[in-house]
Image: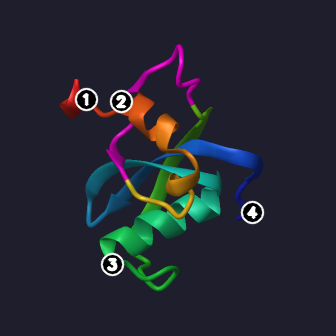
């Protein structure tokens, strides 16, 4: 399956099922494949060898306007190589545990 690529970095939300457990993540990426790579790498999973992992759903949101917007929710924030370019956006992204 071909996954979308975005012309600019976005917050990508992923719902993954592994070993019958539902997990939610978010990361900054240029596409869904890059977001999956971030999550797999962070968790020590092998892509695509871990066949017990299913991408259940994904969504995306533009990076927040740091002067007027806060985004709450979305699952565990996973680091990405793009974080260094968007520190203000990261400050505006909050998980439910942070609120």
Q: Work out whether residue 65 or residue 96 is closer to the camera in this orientation and state it.
A: 65
CA separation in Å, label 2 and label 4: 27 Å
- Circle 2 packing at 10 Å, graded few (<14), some (14-19), many (20+), is some
Tag 2's secondary structure? loop
Residue holding disc 2: 73
Kindly state the secondary structure of the residue where label 1 is placed.
Answer: helix
Seen in the picture, residue 6 relative to 53 is either above or below; the reply is above
Q: Mark 4 or 3, which is nearer the eye? A: 3
Identify residue for label 1: 96
| Lower position in the chain sequence, tag 3 or tag 1 | 3
Question: Residue at image x 36%, y 48%?
Answer: 77
Q: Position of residue 64 (x, y in %)?
A: 56, 28
Q: Are marks 1 and 2 in contact (CB under 8 Å)?
A: yes
- Placement of 65 over or under 46, stated as above or below: above
Q: Which residues are magenta?
A: 64-77
Other-residue count near label 3 (Cα within 10 Å), few / some / many at <14 / 14–19 / ≥20: few
User: Viewed as shown, does residue 51 lie left or right of 24?
Assistant: right
Kindly report which numbered mark, 2 or 4, lies closer to the viewer in this rendering: 2
């Amino acid at each position: 399956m071909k996954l979308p690529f975005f012309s600019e970095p976005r917050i990508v939300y992923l719902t993954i099922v592994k070993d019958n457990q539902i997990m939610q993540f978010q990361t900054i990426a240029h596409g869904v494949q890059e977001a999956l790579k971030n999550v797999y790498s962070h968790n020590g999973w092998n892509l695509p060898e871990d066949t017990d992992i299913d991408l259940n759903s994904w969504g995306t949101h533009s990076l927040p306007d740091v002067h007027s917007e806060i985004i709450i929710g979305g699952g565990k924030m996973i680091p990405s190589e793009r974080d260094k370019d968007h520190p203000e956006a990261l400050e505006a992204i909050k998980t439910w545990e942070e609120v």
